[in-house]
Image: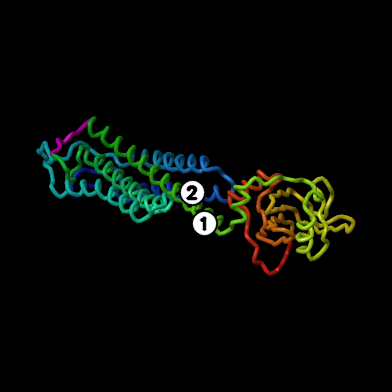
Amino acid sequence: MPCPSCRVVLRAGNTTETLFLLITLGGGIIGGVLAIYAHERLGWTNADVLKFAIAAAVGGGSICGFVIWQLGDYTSRPRGEDEDFVEADRATRLRVLGLVIAPILLLLLARVAFKNAADQLLIMLPAWAAAWFGASICLLWVGIRVKRSGRWPPPGMRMAARTRIRRGKYAMWSRIVLVSAAGFATVAALAGLFAWHVTSQFVAEEAWLTRNHALVKVLTANYQPVSRVDAIPTGVRAALFGLMKDDPRLANPDERFNSTDVVDRRFPMRRLIVAGGLPTSWLVCYEHGGRGYVRHLVIFGVRDDRVELQFSGSVGAKVTSLRELRKAIREGHVSDNTRDASGHY
């Protein structure tokens, strides 16, 4: 059908090209969302998530872009055009200058308003992603217009500087550069979204740890690990057994215990995983069997002859040592049940 602006005959409809444009951008966004979901639910590493997001954006963009260039083919140069240059437009020059200055002003504003680097990133990264997504749409759309008209710059496009009109191979390479730049812009936007996701998780975990001083102490203090129940001080054991409403016994790591709801009363319901001590603090991590299997972590403060509970929670990851327990705390697999009135220990 004829193009009303440049009187060039299209072989593919505008609706088709718009649809593929939306599929390209939607594929990149969906790829990023799926990668983040896999990071949270399937245990993917940050590197795996970034690779998947980049592959989804580049793969989807390349396939859909190829179809667009093939179906969006046009006949030769439009008739009735004799101009050789597109004159500079002052308003366009001001817009380009504004696009350069705006990120600098936003960066300066974020640095002034927020002293914490993480807070600055939480402000800057969404703006980064939005800018690159917008750039990818504009670059791809300009590339489509170059393909339609067979020239660079396309008809009706305003330029910041006086630009010679090019056709033939120059126009072909211009659209290749434009679609490649659109792909890179999409990748940059996805990378910004992923970085924002990681930063927001870090800030949330840091805030949670800040409220739990006992857990911070586990990460920073040099707890001396023990692997036998009788190596735990008597006062700490008495405080721990006092929390257990039924069967106040604790098996050693290599001993049998009731891990399921098939209970043999000859064996304890709980088994020690690891314990560690300081002169002023003791932690005990143990398994609790029965109808609902759970791993508990309790931390006691010790002062003179007094032992008081400072923290209690459940560990959502498998741990077998103090090092693995610290890793679980850093990765947010430990929940805080200190104020839980049910007293399930």
Question: Measured from the top left, where is residue 278 in percent x and y?
Answer: 69, 50
Which residue: 81% across, 64% down?
246
Point out which mark residue 198 bears. Answer: 2
192 over 309 or under it: above or below: above
Which residue: 56% across, 44% down?
44
Q: Secondary structure at mark 2?
A: helix
State the count of labels. 2
Question: Measured from the top left, where is residue 211 in percent x and y?
Answer: 56, 59
Q: Nearer the viewer, residue 90 or 253?
A: 253
Query: Which residue type does callout 1 highlight?
Result: Ala
Q: Nearer the viewer, residue 144 or 293?
A: 293
133 left or right, relative to 158: right
What quarter of the picture does the C terminus occupy? bottom right
| Neighbourhood count class around disc 2 (C-alpha, 10 Å): few under 14, some 14–19, many 20 upward | some
The magenta-colored residue range is 162-168
Which residue: 49% across, 41% down?
52
- Distance from Cα at disc 2 to Cα at disc 1: 14 Å
Question: Measured from the top left, where is residue 28 in percent x and y?
Answer: 42, 46
Residue 160 is inside the magenta segment:
no
Q: Secondary structure at mark 1?
A: helix
197 over 162 or under it: above or below: below
Question: Measured from the top left, where is residue 20 in percent x and y?
Answer: 37, 47
174 left or right, relative to 111: left
Residue farthest toward the right in the current orientation of the protein: 266
53 left or right, relative to 314: left
Residue farthest toward the bottom in the current orientation of the protein: 341
Query: Which residue type does callout 2 highlight?
Result: Val
Point out which mark residue 84 bears. Answer: none
Residue bearing the label numbered 1: 207
Q: Earlier in the sequence, mark 2 or mark 1?
A: 2
Q: On the image, which quarter does residue 261 sit in?
A: bottom right
